[in-house]
Structures are given as C-alpha cells and as structure tokens.
Image: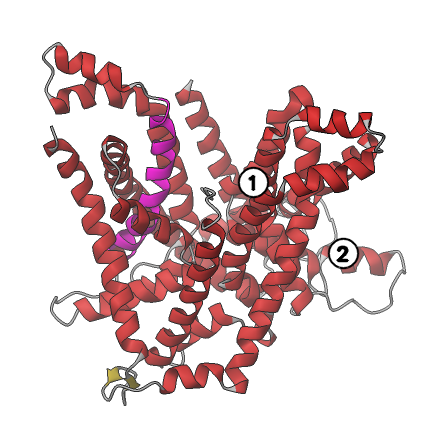
Amino acid sequence: MKRGLALYAACAYAFLHLPLLILAIFSFNASKFTVWQGFSLHWYAAAMADTELIQSAMNSLIIGICATAIATVIGTMAAYALWKRASTWVSGAMYLSLVTPEIVTGVSLLALFQWSFRFLHLRLGMHTVILAHVAFSVAYVAVVVMARLRSFDPALEEAALDLGATEFGAFQRVTLPYLAPAVIAAAMLAFTVSIDDYVITSLVAGIDSQTLPMAIYAMARRGVNPVLNAVSTMIVVGLGAMVLISERLRK
Amino acid sequence: MRRLRTIFLTPAGALMFATLVVPSLIICTYSFLSRGAYGGVERPFTIDNFERLIAPLYGAIFFRSFWIAAVATALCLALGFPLALFIARSGERKNLYLGLVILPFWTSFLIRIYAWMFLLRDTGLINTVLLKIHAIHDPLPMLYNDGAVILGLVYGFLPFTVLPLYATLERLDPSLLEAAADLGSKPWDALWRVTIPLCAAGFRAGAILVFVPCLGTYIVSDLLGGSKTILIGNLVQNQFTASRDWPFGAAAALALMIVAMALLFAARRRGEELL
C-alpha cells in the first residue's frame, strides 16, 4: 500500500505542477506553434514592448500596493481588537466576506458604487478597484494575524502596562513586534489575492483602470498566445520570488 | 481600557458595513424591482425575477451548476484523500510535501486555468503529441465542454480538500489503527472501516470549501467551457454587464448567496470550525 500511495502522490503532484511548468518551457519556444523549434526570448521581448500590457501591469502594481497597505493596517487592527474581546458582528461579517462567491461580491460592489454615484460625482476607476480589493482582503489579513495572536501571552502586555506604558504604547512596542511575521505574511497574501483577482476587478474597473489579469483574460479569451505564456511565466516567477523574500524576512 | 479596542475595531466594522451590509441590502432591493428602459432599475416591485429563475431555461442553468460543482467536489475529495494520507504518513518530509500542495495558492489562479487552455486546445500539447505518435487522426475536442470545466475546477480546488483532510488525519490516534491490526484487520480494511470514517469532519470541511466556490465559478466555465457552458456565475455576470438586466442579475446573485449560506450553516451547526 505504501508504494502505491507514493506512486499516486507523484502523479498528483505532476497534475498540480506540470501544467505551469510546461507553459513556462513553451514560453521560450521560438515557434508560435506547439512544436519545439529552439530557445528564444522573442515572446518576452514582445510582451515588454506591448504598451497596453505594461500599463495594465503598472495599474495592477499601484492597486496591489495601495490595497495591501490599507487592508494590512485595518485587518491587523481588527484582529487585535477581536483578540481583546470577540465581536460576533465584525467577525461574522468577515467570515461572510471570505465565503461569499466572488461573482456575488463583484456585482454587489458594482451596485453599491453605481448607487453612490447618484450622490457623489465620481466614476468607476482606480479608486473603486482599490476600495474593492481592500474590502475582500481585510478578512484574509485578519485571519492570518488572528492565528498568530492565539499564541501570544497577554501577560506580556499586562507587564508593559504595569511598567507604565500606555495602552497604545504596549501594543506598539510589545504586541506588534511579536505579530510582525504574521503581518508580513498577511500582507503577502493580500497582495497575491489583489494582483490575481479578475472577477471582482473587471466589474468595478473603469476605462482607465485595466489591470494585468484583465489584459490576460482578454488575451486568453481570444485564444492561446505565446506572448501570454511569457507574461504568465513572469508573473508566476515574480510572485514566487516575492514569497521567498518574505519567508527570508520572517526568519 | 476599552477605548483602544473600539478605535481599532471601527475601521474594519465601518468597511464591512459599507462593503458588505449596504451592498447586500441594495442587491436585495434590486431583486424585487423591474428593469428600466435604459438598463437601470425601476419600480414597480415585483417577484417576476424570481419566477424567471425557476423557469425551465434558467432552472436548467442552476441544475447544471449544481451538477458540475457536485462532480468536481466528489473528485476533489476522492483524489485529495490519498494525497492527504501520503503526506500524513511521510514522516520527516511532511513539510515539503505539504508545501507542494500549498504552492498553488501563491501563484495565479487565472494563469493556472490558462495553462490548461494551452494543453487542451485542438493544436495544444496533448493533441499535438497524440497526432505525432499517430494515436489519433483528428484532434480530440477536449476544450470547451463540461469535462474541461470539471477538470479545471478539480485542478484549481484540489488543495482545498487536501488541507482539511490532512489536518484530521494528523489528529488521528495511531493506536486506533494498531488496535484494528491486533484484532486482525488488514491495512485496507482498517483504512475503510477506521481511518475514513474518522475523517468525516475533514471530508465535510473539504466538501464545503470546494462546493461553494465551484457553484459560483466564473473564470473556469468561461475560459474552459466556452459559450456552451453557462453556469450561475456567468449568468450573474452577464446580467450585470452585457444584458444589463440588473434586477434579474440581483435575483440570481441572491439565490446563489442563499444557497451558499445554507450549505455553510448546515456544515457549521455540527460545531466545527471551517477556518
């Protein structure tokens, strides 16, 4: 049974990881077709020369960084507050936002924005995308930071208070340093979710806020394209590098 | 003492109110309104939208979505369990093997689905290789059908069953298996009659974690299913964009949400934490 299980696991891992690996290999193919005709960086050059792709990548980075920063702050604060004393309402709402199907979140936010534009003279754009990304990533941040808080000893904070620290001082100088690794991990998760989102983003984006997943999606719907293989490889490698660096930072 | 907590909780509470509670109320209201002449929403209040949902045309879409999500969930559980078992019994290398399951969470879901388009299309890798070795004469139509959608869902959500199953296997008391062996049961018997029943909680958690997102899937059915496979997610998206029938879209979104909530509630009542 043991050998059978190992064989099965090898197949399962191949199933999980080979498709991306094959995609990456063929992004270096000189030919446009699925026949290997030698190594080439042609498709990478074509991707870098595509101004629309570069612009959407820039938009994605701006949105990802802004949304991650805001969501990490709000989510960490919420996790700390919920650790002090539970709140059924807030944690229930966050749980709900985690399990709501993306498409429902997307159309709900679209309806909210369009409704609010009756009073506000605004339009869909970068700001609505950032707000939407903050809304769906706060819960991820809170869950990750909460997990770390479970192993935090409240006596450490009490000691700081006894020694004359203010409540905020104790949080800032005792609790927050302890939480730092989880906060970094949470930010990475929020950034990954933000940079990858298509469903919600495409619904709340305006004409000036096309993101990288939107550009990729439009290309993918037109069919397979070697430029897209190169873009995909760069994104996967980029995200991988980011995760590795954050792992180093945590140690 | 309580002031800091209040200050810290306010932003998240306000955000959740503004982006979860208010939009839900708007969607609920819209679902009872009529479609306006220019794609907006108008009075009178009506239940037409919900009646249309259960009419044969759209009822069939709901049924198909349930069917596809159920098949994908069953496959994820069946394929995920042996992998979870392998990881739980792999000793020192446990973390490495677990990491290989978590790795996809750190890549892009969209790109992972695109990779299958690259493999499955008529001139894709699989067809090219099969044609080269003369196993087939015409390319197999592997893309743009229900099978491709189910494959994409299983590929995307398999890790969601492996993790909870692994967590329950990890907590399993090994002496129970020793007892089964002492009483004369073979490893296969013990697996079926001891291990699997004791993993019921993991199966339930995995089923919910996969079924709910599969039911509302949009990307997978759109990219791998093409225009032939319309599921609830595509229906909702379409009503809010191309068709501009917001009240009907809102009713469909509300129905999807209610089903998802009911399933989660049913699973949670057993007193288990899903997250």
Disc 1 to disc 2, C-alpha distance = 33 Å
* Total tally of numbered discs in the picture: 2
- Image quadrant in which the C terminus of chain A is located: top left
Q: Nearer the viewer, mark 1 or mark 2?
A: 1
Magenta: main secondary structure: helix
Rendered location of residue B36, percent (x, y): 27, 87
The reply to whether the magenta stretch includes residue A5 is no
Q: Is residue B100 left or right of residue A164?
A: right
Residue drawn at 72 percent across, 65 percent down: B142
Q: Is residue B5 left or right of residue A15?
A: left
User: In the orientation shown, which residue stands out farthest toward the right?
Assistant: B134
Residue A28 visible in the shown view:
yes
Residue drawn at 25 percent across, 57 percent down: B19
Residue A25 visible in the shown view:
no
Circle 1 residue: B164
- In the depicted structure, whether residue B63 falls above or below residue B202: below
Residue drawn at 43 percent across, 57 percent down: A198
Rendered location of residue B60, percent (x, y): 57, 79
Q: Is residue B24 left or right of residue B178?
A: left
Circle 2 residue: B126
Q: Are marks 1 and 2 on the same chain?
A: yes
Magenta residue span:
A127-151
